Image: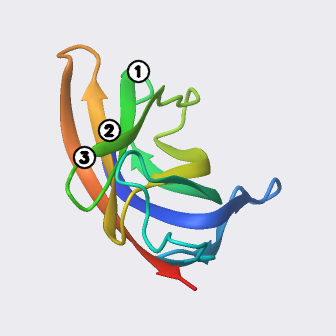
Amino acid sequence: MPKHIWSVICRKGSIDSETNLISLLDVLERIDVAIEKTEGVSELPKSGGILLPFEAELVSFFTCDPREESEVITEFLNPNGQILLAETHKLKVKAGDKRVRSKLKLSNLPVNKSGAYIFKVSIKDTSSNKALIVAEIPLDIEIIFK
């Protein structure tokens, strides 16, 4: 099973084509969202919340055996622990490599309250079909009505 080394939420993960080094641009820990108050509305809707326009990437780094097949499961949870988004993708390791990076592009996030949201990263071993949580990355989202 691959070994998770790190995961980071950032605006962009840029890989240099000559050196294969990655630069993590604008690492995110907190987002403040300003919402214009309209007449009679000073909180998010009780059902569903809003879709927050959010251009970012969740970049992860793993070491592994290229002969193994594994999947990465990423879930986005609200402060109550409810899963709002889930994405699964295979780790693709080139022959001869023992490490791999994974970049999950994010474009919109469902938000239903202020608080500590979590990106949960799990590795699923395809031979045993078991998933193991390897990281929980917090993202504080503060919704401010103006």
Amino acid type shown at disc 2: Pro
- Disc number at residue 111? none
Q: Given the image, on which type of amino acid does mark 3 rest?
A: Gln
**Left or right: 36 in relation to 139:** right
The answer to whether residue 64 shows anywhere in this view is: no
Q: CA distance from mark 3 to mark 1?
A: 35 Å
Residue at the image position 20 percent from the left and 57 percent from the top: 80
Against 21, is 146 above or below? below
Residue 44: x and y, percent?
44, 63
Q: Do tag 3 and tag 1 residues touch (Cβ < 8 Å)?
A: no
Q: Secondary structure at mark 3?
A: loop
Kindly identify which residue carries mark 2: 2
Looking at the image, do the residues carrying marks 1 and 2 touch, with CB atoms under 8 Å apart? no
Checking the image for residue 82, the label placed there is 3
Q: Amino acid at mark 1?
A: Arg
Q: Quadrant of the N terminus?
A: top left
Of pointers 1 and 2, the one earlier in the residue sequence: 2
User: Residue 6 appears in which quarter of the rendering?
Assistant: bottom left
For image coordinates 45% across by 27% down, the residue present is 66
| Residue 66 visible (yes or no) | yes
Residue denoted by label 1:
67
Extreme residue toward the right, this view: 18
